[in-house]
Image (cartoon, rainbow, N blue to C red):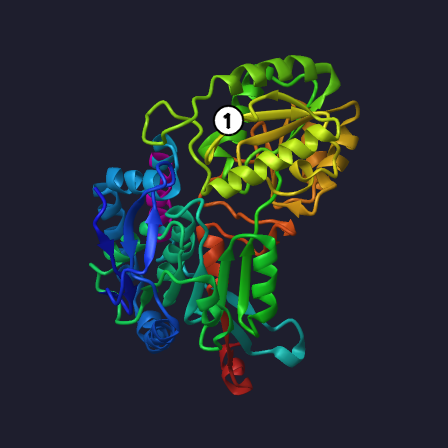
């Protein structure tokens, strides 16, 4: 299914200067294909091409930008199963989750196509005082210019799409560095974009080593940096980004609260999904479960029953829920975090067994809050259960985290739902569901160590454009003639 090798895309064109990057099948460990790897010279050429493309991209009419995005939607639909199978290999993502990601890729480009013709401005009456009589303002949105994108391994298609599709809708050229562990999905996006009539230099998609990506961050020709990844890397990049705009989506250790009176069957089903879909490798995966003492026993029983039934193994198997983590080293890390929790009094309710890069769905309880498995981002199929007696105390426990991306609250109390919305220090509060839920049109991002700014197509377009004001003065003589 995979080609023996893949080019990178430099200024809209495929180039094969080498086959230096091995892409490993995350389940078998075998080399699945090889990819061209960009060096500093290629990255510099791509940025220069994007700079030259800034004016032609900004000049594209709305219907022209929409035509490019509509073409992508058609081609992604035609290649949907191919794309899903690529994710199985390069990311170890279970096939059902892979198909779901392809569906979201298509959704994201569809939303961007709709938004590409809605870059609206407004009329601003300015005559609030006698001094401003005869003045009126008009605003429009204009592209910021060349953008730099760095995307992660866990959603190789859709998180790249959340940068690429809004850039096209906004009229911004871009250079994209996909994760070196999972470059294939982004390169297929490049292959489809190369079929369109985008201006020369409008896009480059360049896998490269982390130490070769300095220009993606520091080059002053780039006017915006959008990074999705770890907090340590993200904040370091922001510090070196100069005066360009920076958008960071940096992950978290998401909580869900299950209040007394919640529908436990529904909550258990959704929490099982939220904790273990795509093997827990999601920045909004359920990691901390806060259950009211009145329902904790029943919820624990339901969660353990469901988690034990989740098949782990080959991600190409239609039945598999838990596939391999991105590397065996990550599974070993999580295994050590579980061991630390147990050594400090925590209990493993189910799971905890590792086979290579595969870790069974794991639930723990009674874990001290300063253990790594609670305090840091697990990024794997592990969740920790705790109990509370007071709803406000549960809110405080959610907030006792360096992260603040999303939180879920299962409650039937309208006032408690609003209290959670007011009190929780997160980018989004999801009532009646898990924090793992996301629509690709909604504003998405966090606070504290979870990042800066918001993704979601319309909100990303806002970041990739700037407000430009025009003020028009009507002379007094003309105003007098109108009265």
**Image location (x, y in percent) of residue 481:** 49, 82
Q: Residue at x 36, y 68 (%)?
A: 173
Left or right, 248 with respect to 374, comes to left
Depth order, front residue of 72/127: 72
**80 in magenta:** no
**Image location (x, y in percent) of residue 447:** 64, 51
Q: Residue at x 44, y 68 (%)?
A: 212
**Image location (x, y in percent) of residue 440:** 44, 44
The answer to whether residue 102 of the structure is visible from this angle is no
Dot 1, crowdedness within 10 Å: few (<14), some or many (≥20)?
Answer: many
Q: Which residue is mark 1?
A: 360
Depth order, front residue of 415/438: 438
Q: Quadrant of residue 382?
A: top right
Total marks shown come to 1
**Rendered view: 54 above or below 327:** below
Depth order, front residue of 31/58: 31
* Secondary structure mostly seen in the magenta stretch: helix
**105 in magenta:** yes
Q: Which residues are magenta?
A: 99-112
Left or right, 99 with respect to 301, comes to left
**Rendered view: 168 above or below 137:** above
**Image location (x, y in percent) of residue 445:** 56, 49
The answer to whether residue 431 of the structure is visible from this angle is yes
Depth order, front residue of 296/91: 91
Q: Quadrant of residue 135?
A: bottom right
Q: Secondary structure at mark 1?
A: loop
Left or right, 104 with respect to 6, comes to right
């Amino acid at each position: 299914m995979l080609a023996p090798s893949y080019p990178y895309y430099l200024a809209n064109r495929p180039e094969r200067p080498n086959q230096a990057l091995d892409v490993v099948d995350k389940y078998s460990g075998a080399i699945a294909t090889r990819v061209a790897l960009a060096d500093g010279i290629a990255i510099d050429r791509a940025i220069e091409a994007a700079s030259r493309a800034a004016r032609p991209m900004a000049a594209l009419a709305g219907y022209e930008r929409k035509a490019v995005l509509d073409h992508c939607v058609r081609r992604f639909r035609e290649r949907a199963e191919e794309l899903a199978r690529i994710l199985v290999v390069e990311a170890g993502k279970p096939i059902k989750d892979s198909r779901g990601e392809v569906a979201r890729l298509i959704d994201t480009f569809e939303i961007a196509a709709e938004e590409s013709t809605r870059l609206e401005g407004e009329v601003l009456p300015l005559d609030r005082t006698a001094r401003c009589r005869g003045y009126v303002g008009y605003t429009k949105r204009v592209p910021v210019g060349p953008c730099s994108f760095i995307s992660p391994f866990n959603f190789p298609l859709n998180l790249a799409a959340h940068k690429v599709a809004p850039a096209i809708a906004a009229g911004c050229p871009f250079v994209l560095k996909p994760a070196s562990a999972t470059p294939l999905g982004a390169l297929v996006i490049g292959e489809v974009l190369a079929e369109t009539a985008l201006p020369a230099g409008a896009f480059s998609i360049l896998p490269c080593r982390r130490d070769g990506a300095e220009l993606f961050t520091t080059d002053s020709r780039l006017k915006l940096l959008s990074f999705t990844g770890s907090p340590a890397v993200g904040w370091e990049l922001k510090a070196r980004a100069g005066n360009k705009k920076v958008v960071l989506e940096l992950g978290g250790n998401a909580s869900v609260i299950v209040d007394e009176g919640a529908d436990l069957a529904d909550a258990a089903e959704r929490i099982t999904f939220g904790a273990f879909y795509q093997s827990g490798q999601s920045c909004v995966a359920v990691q901390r479960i806060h259950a009211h003492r009145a329902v904790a026993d029943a919820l624990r029983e339901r969660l353990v029953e469901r988690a034990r039934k989740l098949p782990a193994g080959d991600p190409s198997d239609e039945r598999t829920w838990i596939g391999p983590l991105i590397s065996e080293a990550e599974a070993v890390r999580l295994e050590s975090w579980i061991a630390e929790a147990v050594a400090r009094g925590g209990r493993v309710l189910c799971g905890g067994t590792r086979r290579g890069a595969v870790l069974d769905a794991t639930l723990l309880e009674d874990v001290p809050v300063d253990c790594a498995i609670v305090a840091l981002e697990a990024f794997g199929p592990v969740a920790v259960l705790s109990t509370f007696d007071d709803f406000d105390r549960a809110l405080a426990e959610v907030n006792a985290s360096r992260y603040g991306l999303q939180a879920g609250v299962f409650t039937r109390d309208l006032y408690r739902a609003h209290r959670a919305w007011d009190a929780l220090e997160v980018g989004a509060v999801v009532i009646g569901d898990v924090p793992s839920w996301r629509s690709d049109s909604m504003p998405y991002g966090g606070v504290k160590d979870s990042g800066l700014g918001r993704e979601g197509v319309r909100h990303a377009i806002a970041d990739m454009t700037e407000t430009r004001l025009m003020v028009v003065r009507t002379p007094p003589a003309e105003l007098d003639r109108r009265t």
